[in-house]
Amino acid sequence: MILDKKAILEYQQNRDPYLMIDEATEIVPGKSAKGFKLLKGVDDEWFFKVHWPNDPNMPGMLQIEAMTQMSALSILTLPGNKGKVTHAISHTVRFKREILPGEKLDIQ
């Protein structure tokens, strides 16, 4: 299953500016989801303007939110789950590098 941004909005309730995924390129309902967010320029993404002035990067908590939204699609695409609310209860994450303006954040 592949979902563009319009179709993603049918399955989950986050909206811009808090929608952190642009496309789901591969969803296996109940198993996995892959996709991405294309990060625009410094003036185009709200968080670049407020997170570390003069050193714009995507905040770690928004990277976690992007992963949460993507993984939720693997649950929300199961029959009867479309549009339901999901919550991430616990996570442990290690960041390897900053995500910068103009980059593509791949999410699996």
Image (tube, rainbow, N blue to C red):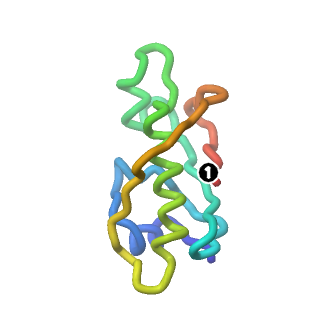
Name the residue: 46% across, 73% down. Answer: 76
Q: Amino acid at mark 1?
A: Ile
Q: Quadrant of the C terminus?
A: bottom right
Name the residue: 54% across, 41% down. Answer: 39
Q: Percent position (x, y) of residue 33?
A: 61, 64
Residue furthest out toward the front:
90
Name the residue: 56% across, 61% down. Answer: 23
Q: Percent position (x, y) of residue 60?
A: 49, 32
Q: Quadrant of the N terminus?
A: bottom right
- Residue 53 lies in quadrant: top left
Q: Percent position (x, y) of residue 41?
A: 51, 34
Q: Nearer the viewer, residue 16 or 84?
A: 84
Image side of residue 96 versus residue 80, left or right: right
- Residue 99 lies in quadrant: top right
Question: Relative to 62, is 1 above or below?
Answer: below
Q: Percent position (x, y) of residue 6?
A: 45, 70
Name the residue: 53% across, 50% down. Answer: 67
Image side of residue 18 versus residue 23, left or right: left
Image side of residue 35 versus residue 79, left or right: right
Question: Relative to 65, is 21 above or below?
Answer: below
Q: Which residue is mark 1?
A: 107
Q: How many marks?
A: 1
For numbered disc 1, what is the local secondary structure?
Answer: strand
Question: Relative to 96, is 39 above or below?
Answer: below
